[in-house]
Image (spheres, grey):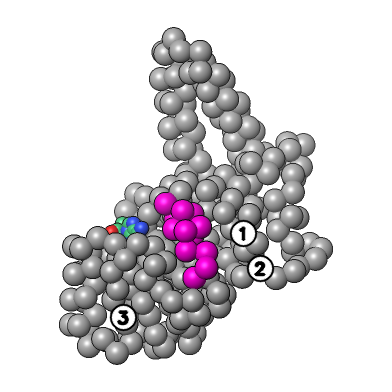
Amino acid sequence: KLSKRLQMIADRVPLGSKVADIGSDHALLPTYLAQQGIIVFAVAGEVNPGPFEAATRQVLESGLSKKISVRSGDGLAVIEPGEVNVITIAGMGGSLMASILEAGKQKLVGVTHLILQPNVGEDQVRKWLLAEGWNLDAEAILEEDGKIYEILTATAGRIVVGENSQQALYAERTLTGGIVVSKERLLQMGPYLLEEAPEVWFSKWDSELKKLAMIEGQLKLSTAEASAAKAEQIAQEIKEIKEVLACLQ
Ligand code: SAM
């Protein structure tokens, strides 16, 4: 049985896909997808020897060697252009995720869906998707074992006009309380999550605010000029996030 987090990622993989799961660790996700008949083929990519061996063993023991190819390599280096139509990357930081996608851009030919679950730095992922013409189609948030995770689903860029365009998605919004949400806040907090404002999203931002306040406090202790400026910037960020949350609560 998959964890709730991996199950939610699996649920987003279209039927009949060819998937590359990058940073697959024990290859639990591709194994499940193959066993359920959701995918026709998968690549499980791993850069580290330990997880690579774990993935190899898992696939062999599950008798799925014909359907899942376990490959050793950095990011998208493990796939050929056109080999898969879905890429899943889960359980790593958003900036690493964005750099993997950026470095492997030429491998994204034929990829229609990206299903991404950054542990932190979701804004880095949204920024990359936006800059590269991917459409952020949906966001999900879940809590498991005291941790909160976001899952971002994007589809390959096509020209969309009107309400559905990414420009509209990230355009400054005015909430009912009159608070203006900037593009920066939307990239950080999630344009769909902000719209839906689920309970667990509030919990996430409560704890993010605590972390930001701690950083601000530490910066204020420093005598360096740059620290004072940074503290001021974080104070402003805290203020804006609080205003947004207050408007939506
Ligand atoms: N995707 C699984 C999940 O969500 O449960 C495993 C997550 S695990 C915390 C992150 C995995 O990413 C590790 O096994 C690590 O070796 C792998 N990894 C980190 N950087 C990578 C890279 N540049 N290319 C491929 N794999 C990478």
As drawn, the label of residue 132 is 1
Q: Look at the image and say whether residue 162 sits in the magenta stretch.
A: no
Q: CA distance from mark 2 to mark 1?
A: 8 Å
- Nearest to the observer: residue 133 or residue 28: 133
Query: Whole-percent x and y of residue 57?
Result: 18, 76
- Which mark sits nearer the N-terminus, 3 or 2? 3
Look at the image and tell me in which quarter the N terminus lies.
Answer: bottom left
Task: In the rendered view, tell whether residue 82 sits above or below residue 22.
Answer: below
Above or below for 108 versus 175: below
Q: CA distance from mark 3 to mark 1?
A: 28 Å
Residue plotted at (20% across, 63% down): 49
Mark 3 and mark 2: Cα distance apart in space: 28 Å
- The span picked out in magenta is 96-107
- For label 2, being within 8 Å of ligand 1 is answered no
Q: Secondary structure at mark 2?
A: loop
Q: Residue type at mark 1: give it.
A: Glu
Q: Residue at x 46, y 13 (%)?
A: 224
Q: Are marks 3 and 2 in contact (CB under 8 Å)?
A: no
Q: Which residue is under mark 3?
A: 69
